[in-house]
Amino acid sequence: MFESIERVPGDAILGLIQQFKDDPNPNKVDLGVGVYRDEHGNTPILRAVKDAEKKLIDTEQTKAYIGSHGDPQYGEYILQTVLGADSKVLAANRASATQSPGGTGALRLAADFLVSQLPGKAIWLPNPTWPNHLGVFEAARLEIKRYPYVDDNDQFDFDAMLKKLKSIPKGDIVLLHACCHNPTGFDPSQDQWHQILEVVQDRELLPLVDFAYQGFGDGLDEDAYGVRLLADHLDEMVITQSCSKNFGIYRERTGCFIAIAKDEEDMQDVRSQLATTARENYSNPPAHGSAIVATIMGSAELTAAWHRELDEMRDRINDVRQKLVEGLKPHGLADKFAFITDQRGMFSYTGLTEDQVNKLRDEYSIYMVASGRANVAGLNDDNIEYVCKAIADVVG
Ligand code: PLP
């Protein structure tokens, strides 16, 4: 039976990781894979996470199932972090949290929920977007449509985005990146979020806000500006959240699906459906990551330590963006790449063409995604000059 099954190409980024590993060049630089790197190129476990794990060894009482919605305490902490402790939505009991296996698990829950409960609605994704949005939504058989996000020069094109959103059929679903847009790094300004809200209200759209990088842009509250604005003004929306990046617990698969309804009654109806969706997919979410997060958030000391480490990661990313543009100055390229300091999060659409990306890889062992997306967290004081010189060569 298996004879007729064809082999498909693997994930492009995983292929890139392998090529990087096999590359013997001692100067090689990985700007491809989407994890945070410190100045030594490592992705260490946060101290707050380690301390929480030590605490858990002594205090955890059982490994029994945690239920389809996961740990309620974790859900409460995530709701407060995403929506703000003083959120009107929380006060009115209009938001439901379902713990999920990472942000990807939350997206799959969202997709299955939308397909089964709101059949016939298309989801509009920015172009470009995180490629797995397409994978997850296609797998769930959700109809996918696109709105533009960048222009021909790979710069943020808010006017084109808004124009398209204004033409979306009433009642469709629109996916918005809350902050640190992957892959471009371009986020709407606060004023632009207000314009998005107006269109969403006018077209009666259901926003699905994907929030995978809270704290990596400008700060935990600052990065939530758009999400909270929409939540404050809309009756209904859904949010997919991830703790992978801001807690650095990628492999623990810790995320959350949040549904906001117009009142508590509707919220409970939606919530009951989500328990079924989760049960049919994987029954219960994994518990270790949410236990880490809840332990940190339940301790003022660990929360303060986590905030410090999150600040460190964010400051490093923003610092390295400045250094990259400064490093391009002697090559006469600072103006051309000035937009890099406006972008937020780990990812940068560099505007480099596929040919230039290939040349960087083949001649300099600098690895980034074919679209020209670079993970700037892969840069450090040891490699930044080398990368700037290489960019100047391939651009020149
Ligand atoms: N959404 C976006 C935009 C992402 O970039 C990612 C991860 O790269 C995710 C969701 C999923 O994150 P997780 O690793 O928690 O599944």
Image: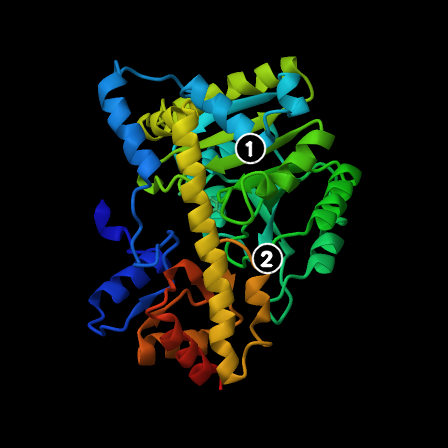
Q: Is residue 297 above or below residue 11?
A: above
Q: Is residue 112 above or below residue 353?
A: above
Which of disc 1 and disc 2 is earlier in sequence?
Answer: 1
Residue 254 occupies quadrant: top left
Answer left or right for 258 relative to 276. right
Identify the residue at horizontal 69%, vertical 55% (top origin).
161
Query: x and y percent of residue 16 in the render?
Result: 32, 63
Identify the residue at horizontal 31%, vertical 50% (top origin).
43
Residue 296 numbered mark, or none: none
Callout 1: helix, strand or loop?
helix
Label 1 crowd bin: few (<14), some (14–19), many (20+), radius 10 Å:
many
Q: Is residue 168 above or below residue 388?
A: above
Q: Which residue is mark 2?
A: 186
Which residue is outermost to the bottom? 396
**Does residue 94 appear in the picture of this structure?**
no
Callout 2: helix, strand or loop?
loop
* Residue type pointed to by label 2: Phe
Q: Which residue is mark 1?
A: 82
3D distance between C-alphas at marks 2 and 1? 20 Å
Q: Nearer the viewer, residue 300 or 321?
A: 300
Query: x and y percent of residue 67 in the render?
Result: 38, 17
